[in-house]
Image (tube, coloured by chain):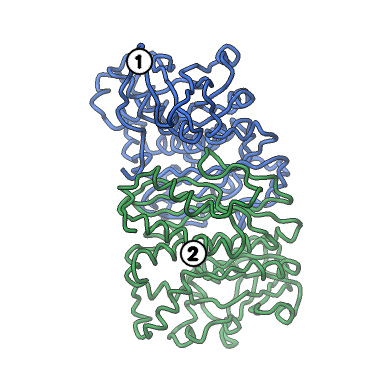
Chain colours: A blue, B green
Amino acid sequence: MEMKLSKLGEDGLINRIISRHLRKDKKSNSVLIDAGDDAAVINRIAGNIVITTDLLIENVHFKVSWADKLGGLNNLFYNLGYKSAAVNISDLSAMGTVTPLYCIIGLGIPSKYSVSNIDNLYSGLQNAFNRCGIRIIGGDTNSSEKLVISITLLGKCADKYGMIPRSGAKPGNKIYVSGRLGNSAAGLHVLMNNPGIAKLSNVDKKWFINKHFHPPIRLTEAKKIARHSTAMIDCSDGLIKSIRIICEQSHCAAKVYLDKVPVSDKLKKLPGYIRYIVNSGEDYELIFTSSSQKLDKIIPGIKYIGEITTGAKNDIKYYLKDRLYKIPQAGYEHFK
Amino acid sequence: MEMKLSKLGEDGLINRIISRHLRKDKKSNSVLIDAGDDAAVINRIAGNIVITTDLLIENVHFKVSWADKLGGLNNLFYNLGYKSAAVNISDLSAMGTVTPLYCIIGLGIPSKYSVSNIDNLYSGLQNAFNRCGIRIIGGDTNSSEKLVISITLLGKCADKYGMIPRSGAKPGNKIYVSGRLGNSAAGLHVLMNNPGIAKLSNVDKKWFINKHFHPPIRLTEAKKIARHSTAMIDCSDGLIKSIRIICEQSHCAAKVYLDKVPVSDKLKKLPGYIRYIVNSGEDYELIFTSSSQKLDKIIPGIKYIGEITTGAKNDIKYYLKDRLYKIPQAGYEHFK
């Protein structure tokens, strides 16, 4: 349906979102009042409450012109929905053993978009949320000049394993990562028409773009990791920045072996692929430290990439093939 | 301090916000992990959980050019902070007996602004939050082209009096309002240089602008009202839209007596002032229904303005001096 939002109006859009996308599952009795009232009311939560928020803003986190590379606006909206859900779920995973529960959504939407675009946004959101039982319970819907998606997630943790901070790393701890880095950054370079990826086949370009919009959901792994982890972060702004934050907050130094970082065969074929893993972001894999020396033998899929050392917190050394690797910059920084 | 955000950078700004604005009160032991980690973790909440979110978006909810009328950018940012806090608190009040607890903030900030502007934004937020014991526990800070402020509040309610829906009005119920309507709308007209308010004195202009940015905090009144109320809403999009939502969700009709709606003496002096109370918004007073016929004699400050009647849910009649009043439009609608 290509009806424009300007024709449907605010009330029409809100009613449509509530009836089509939020009230499919009426069976839950944990939601006492949901979308359509001033606030949502939910049953008391058995455990401590974990809460996180992330904004996705047009021309900062994505460009609408990318729709061309994704097969149209509806596909872009679907992908933005999936990604904005997944990056918030990633923040919950990075705390350890967390059960995600509820979502509340703030939207700013230019009125030129269609009802079908918004349906696709919610399909993407629900696709990610359905994988882990998250229910959308409310929100705020506005017109705006640029697209803004604000997601807040609530989860619960029953014990200390849902509170793995960034600050608990100790010298002697090993550093591990939950999966491959760099694919999302390569996808971003495809979307941005970076000349470095011009030689890729169309199939590979699509593969990287898909990785960019579909960060992994690591809740199951996080639950296993949490019992062994001293510090954990999700890799949203690149390897360098993630390691730096752990070292700063834990007051220690680190050595990282870049050829131990897992990467895809497709990424390895790109010239200078190391820069996609060190300096770019949005992989949303878990980076964590543990006193267990062989955790990669116990938990499938995680890889050992370095160790926490004594020393000044900014004394972080990167090695590539046994040689010191000079890091280019410090991960993605807003405002710079 | 007039240091630009582009000089301070993302990490510098986040560290400054955390150390200056979020960690003044270290005494609380209900926050287990707060800002600076992937997510915040808070103690289990004794009671049901009330949650709401609201976005304030540049050029939709406010214009940066209004800074001229407020004495500069710092004052604008302070006022935006106060207002974005207060409108979210208003949503909690509209649920009844709610104790507000925590705030999580998403920000999109153009890098041209200064550190001092952001300090003022947080001063405004904290000024409102300190009035009701709300603690900021986390957030997400981004650069963006336009200013975006996304606030999510968590509160608790111990019993059914914290869950007054919009849908519980019954024929025969009286309709009440918690305070004066129209001042905020008049303030908006001053800010927009509407010719209708050109004759106002500068003192009166400032008074209306101040009303626009300082919605009332009605948590105390809401607690008293909740025990007697069948339906409640906060008047964010004007009287007409508020009454319409209650009638739609409660499946009933209404009569409203416009000369019973409380207004300020300053507003009464404006020609055609009725339009500021029926069709404009952002008063954030509580509009509610009750089977108590003389509640205005029991709860100070509330005013009787009409009654719920049997009939079709769109059969809402407005009277002015005993004559039927033809309503102009249906309150503020996004996308139109």
Which residue has dot 2 on it? B83
Q: Mark 2 and mark 1: span between their CA atoms? A: 52 Å
B70 on left or right of B213: left
Name above or below for residue B283 compared with residue A147: below
Chain of the residue displaying label 2:
B
Residue A57 visible in the shown view: yes
Give the camera-side residue of B266 and B47.
B47
Category of crowding for the residue at label 1, using alpha-carbon neighbours closer than 10 angstroms: few (below 14), some (14–19), many (at least 20)? some
Give the camera-side residue of A235 and A304.
A304
Q: Which mark is drawn over residue A320? A: 1
Amino acid type, callout 1: Leu
Mark 1 element type: strand
Give the camera-side residue of B317 and A321.
A321
- Which residue is at 47% across, 23% downward? A309
Residue A107 visible in the shown view: no
Give the quadrant of residue B2: bottom left
A22 on left or right of B61: right
Counting from the top left corner in percent of width and height, residue B70 is at: 37, 71
Q: Which mark is drawn over residue A305? A: none
Amino acid type, callout 2: Lys
Mark 2 element type: helix
Give the quadrant of residue B114: bottom left
Image quadrant where one finds the C terminus of chain A: top left
